């Protein structure tokens, strides 16, 4: 039986990813109402309009929705832009990309209401108001 070095590297990469403390921490994070997060938010481009989100619904750029790495779908958040104090209430309906270091990706309408549509990014504080079921 010959050994396939490519297969060995792929299996090793999968093992390291699955056994990584960060992967475990993300999967086991527990959330409570009134927990606060802060960081950078961005918004979905227009080309995402009509595409399926992680929870199966279609993304609508005019809805007040957001993506987060692991908050349950349906979670309701209060998001405040720390640069202008504008706030909005959002519902989690999708997931951020694994490599994304931002706290949230929000809909275009949310970015507009938060006042960072032109800038593309904003420093935000996020408060969990109600946890979703998923």
Image (tube, rainbow, N blue to C red):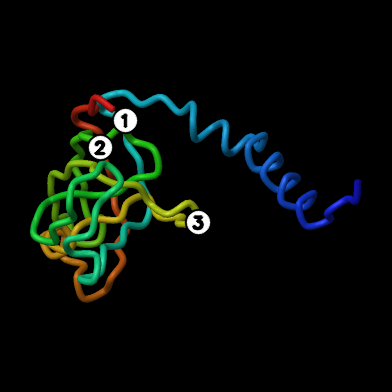
Quarter where residue 34 is shown: top left
Q: Residues within 10 Å of mark 2 (few under 14, many from 20)?
A: some
Which residue is located at x 18 percent, y 46 percent? 57
Which residue is denoted by mark 1 in the rendering?
35
Locate residue 9, reporting x and y percent: 77, 52
- Name the element at disc 3: loop
The answer to the question of whether label 2 and label 1 lie on touching residues, with beta carbons closer than 8 A, is yes
Which residue is located at x 19 percent, y 28 percent? 130
Left or right of 35 on screen, residue 91? left
Residue at mark 2 to residue at mark 1: CA–CA distance? 6 Å
| Residue 64 position (above or below residue 84) | above
Front of the two marks 3 and 2: 3
Which numbered disc covers residue 126?
none
Residue at mark 3 to residue at mark 2: CA–CA distance? 23 Å
Which residue is denoted by mark 2 in the rendering?
127
Residue at mark 3 to residue at mark 1: CA–CA distance? 23 Å
Which residue is located at x 42 percent, y 54 percent? 97
Which residue is located at x 24 percent, y 42 percent? 92
Residue reaching furthest bottom? 118
Quarter where residue 14 is shown: top right
The answer to the question of whether label 3 and label 2 lie on touching residues, with beta carbons closer than 8 A, is no
Left or right of 1 on screen, residue 66? left
Which residue is denoted by mark 3 in the rendering?
99
Left or right of 43 on screen, residue 85? left
Q: Residues within 10 Å of mark 1 (few under 14, many from 20)?
A: few
């Amino acid at each position: 039986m010959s050994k396939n070095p490519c297969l060995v590297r792929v299996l090793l990469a999968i093992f390291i990813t699955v056994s990584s403390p960060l992967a475990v921490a993300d999967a086991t994070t527990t959330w409570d109402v009134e927990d606060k997060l802060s960081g950078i938010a961005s918004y979905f481009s227009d080309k995402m309009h009509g595409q399926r989100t992680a929870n199966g619904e279609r993304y609508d750029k005019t809805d007040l929705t957001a993506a987060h790495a692991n908050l349950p779908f349906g979670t309701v958040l209060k998001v405040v832009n720390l640069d202008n104090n504008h706030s909005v209430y959002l519902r989690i309906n999708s997931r951020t990309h694994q490599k994304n270091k931002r706290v949230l990706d929000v809909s275009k309408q949310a970015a507009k209401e938060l006042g960072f549509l032109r800038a593309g990014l904003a420093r935000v504080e996020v408060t969990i108001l109600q946890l979703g079921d998923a």
